[in-house]
Image (cartoon, helix red, strand yellow):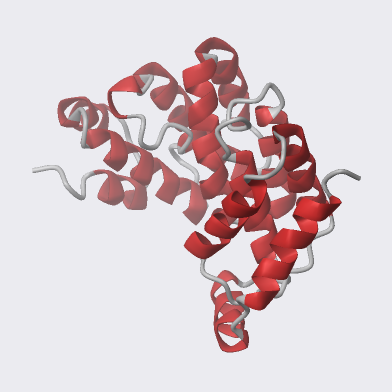
Amino acid sequence: MESDGLVREIRDALRARADPERALAQQAYMKSALPFYGVRLPEVRAVARSAARLYEIPVAAEAASVLWDTVTHREEWYAAMALRGLAGLRRAPDTLEVVTAMVRSGRWWDITDELSHRVADMLDADAVTTARVVGAWSVDEDLWMRRLAIISQLGRKERTDRALLADVIEPNRGDAEFFVAKAIGWALRDYARSDPDWVRAYLDAHDLRALSRREAARHLL
């Protein structure tokens, strides 16, 4: 496979930076069945991006799939996500399909939260189609897909689709699941930086779990 060289370079670079003591702490913190190399996330991203510079975008896409499917350490998943965030890949036609597969198999907050940025990219690239997909995620049986739907607009500021934000929160407002309730508060708190009046009005008009409301109102006066 053309991607073999890129996959090997990334794995070799991660092994070279391994810190066994940090790796144990990371694995415990993430409650991960996968071991860690002990490389911090910003450095993992830098490794992946640097290695990918000499390769064509289709090769980087293939390498991301290989790293994901043959993972031995959690940082390889992080590297795969970093490759999918390259300028030539972040809005690729298969992005939502790849994100869905990664979230469903990764099934934890570090994976879901990182991939939410790719969904935001796709909302900018094709708002109508992406919003339809995100809406379907909001009622998915998988709590991580619901969390992804809720936080899919983080950082979009004035580009936030308020109707979509309200729509994906609605079927989840009463969910007692921590990662869903926390996501609702996070999404509202993030948008409050751009439109605090809308968030105040939303909080006044809707019943939310205490955790969601507390997180949403954290920076509102």
Which residue appears at 60% of the width and 76% of the height?
A: 17
* Relative to 155, residue 109 above or below: below
**Residue 15 quadrant:** bottom right
In the rendering, at what x and y percent does residue 81 appear? 63, 47
In the rendering, at what x and y percent does residue 132 appear? 59, 16
In this view, the residue in front, 67 or 7, is 7
**Residue 58 quadrant:** top right
In the rendered image, the residue lying farthest to the top is 128
Quadrant holding the N terminus: top right
Q: Is residue 162 left or right of residue 94?
A: left
* Relative to 16, residue 50 above or below: above
Which residue appears at 58% of the width and 38% of the height?
A: 86
In this view, the residue in front, 9 or 155, is 9
Which residue appears at 59% of the width and 77% of the height?
A: 38
Quadrant holding the C terminus: top left
In the rendering, at what x and y percent does residue 173 appear? 43, 37
Q: Is residue 202 left or right of residue 66?
A: left
